Image (cartoon, rainbow, N blue to C red):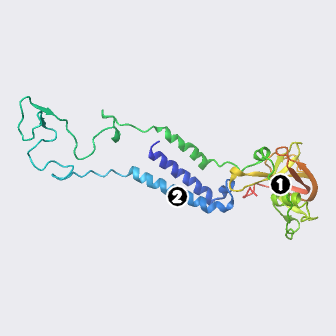
Amino acid sequence: MNRQAQAVILLLLGGAVIRASVTDLYLRYVKEGLRPFLIAAGLLLVAGAIMTLWYELRPAAPRALAPAGEPGGAPAGGDGAAVGGSVPAGGSVDGSVPAGGGVDVPDVDAGGPASGPADGHDGHGHAHHEPRVGWLLILPVLGLLLVAPPALGSYAAGQAGTALSSQQQSDYPPLPEGDPVQVSVLDYASRALFDRGTSIGDRRVQLTGFIVTGADRQPILARMVLSCCAADGRPVKLGLTGDVPAGLPDDSWVEVIGRYSDRLGRDPVNDAEIPYLEVESWRQVPVPKRPYD
């Protein structure tokens, strides 16, 4: 692949990174705190692409002819063997030509390198062209610019076990004021599983997540959590009891209000415990701006 194609790909890729970083699109791929690093990386890619294109497309500087008597120029004196002329067969350099004639020496460009494969020609005057198939690599970059994949959802959650699989006991601070109090799926699941609901008590909580169909065909509330980016995303799952959201397809986002339930289930993927929530009410909501916990 030639350098121009590489530069165009870098330019498009850098533009895609900057476009995602200055909008909320980047939140589908990485955590919120990584935005400055993405912007810096995108600017570096664009700068490198512009410099490469400038170097490749700039007009070639004409080669200056060296003065006579200097390296690369014509000989200063008229005596001796002349480049492109006849050299005595006997090796004499005094200007005399012995019997038998001279030996012709082909002309050589003394002012620069010899013409050959290094200058893009094959010795017969035919230029070698870079394969154009490298330009096809622009297609996936254009796809990244034009089509943004959705955030991880029910399929990823169904293929991975719940992230809360340790059996540790932890102390949690009291819930904030409010009724219901808004908490994340991860916060509720951690308090329900490791604190056995002590820090929740009889408080009403409000959670937002997407629907995943469980092994028993009952809906599960889930939310993906990231350590760094979508590549390491894992689901946090909650079983639902009471006024369970019914008739909704997978990946439907819902807001539920409920209370702590001491019921526990098992994740069929990794056999980890799944806490439950006693649902009092729910409503369907659009996909949030920040889809990950």
Q: Residue at 87% across / 42% down in the picture? A: 215
- Near mark 2 (Cα within 10 A), the count class, few <14, some 14-19 or many ≥20, is some
Numbered badge on residue 217: none
Position of 24 with respect to 78 (left or right) is right
Q: Residues within 10 Å of mark 1 (few under 14, many from 20)?
A: few
Sequence order check: which comes first, mark 2 or mark 1? 2
Q: Nearer the viewer, mark 2 or mark 1?
A: 1
**Residue designated by label 2:** 44
Relative to 149, is 134 on the left or the right? left
Q: Identify which residue, 217 or 237, lies in the foreground.
A: 237
Question: Residue 114, percent across and down?
Answer: 27, 41
Judging by the rendered image, the residue that carries numbered circle 1 is 166
Q: Assign a secondary structure to mark 2.
A: helix
Count of marks placed on residues: 2
Q: Quadrant of residue 181?
A: bottom right
Residue at 82 percent across and 61 percent down: it is: 187
Residue closest to the far top: 100
Question: Could you say where residue 91 lies in the image, as x and y percent from the top left?
Answer: 12, 36
- Look at the image and tell me in which quarter the C terminus lies: bottom right
Residue drawn at point x = 45 percent, y = 46 percent: 3
Disc 2 marks a residue whose amino acid type is Leu
Query: What distance separates the C-alpha of mark 2 from that of mark 1?
Result: 41 Å
In this rendering, position of residue 109 left or right of residue 2: left
Measuring from the top left, give residue 28's x and y in whole percent: 69, 54
Q: Amino acid at mark 1?
A: Ser
Question: Does the rendering let one see residue 131?
Answer: yes
Q: Quadrant of residue 139?
A: top right
As drawn, 134 above or below 46: above
Residue 71 placement, left or right of 99: right
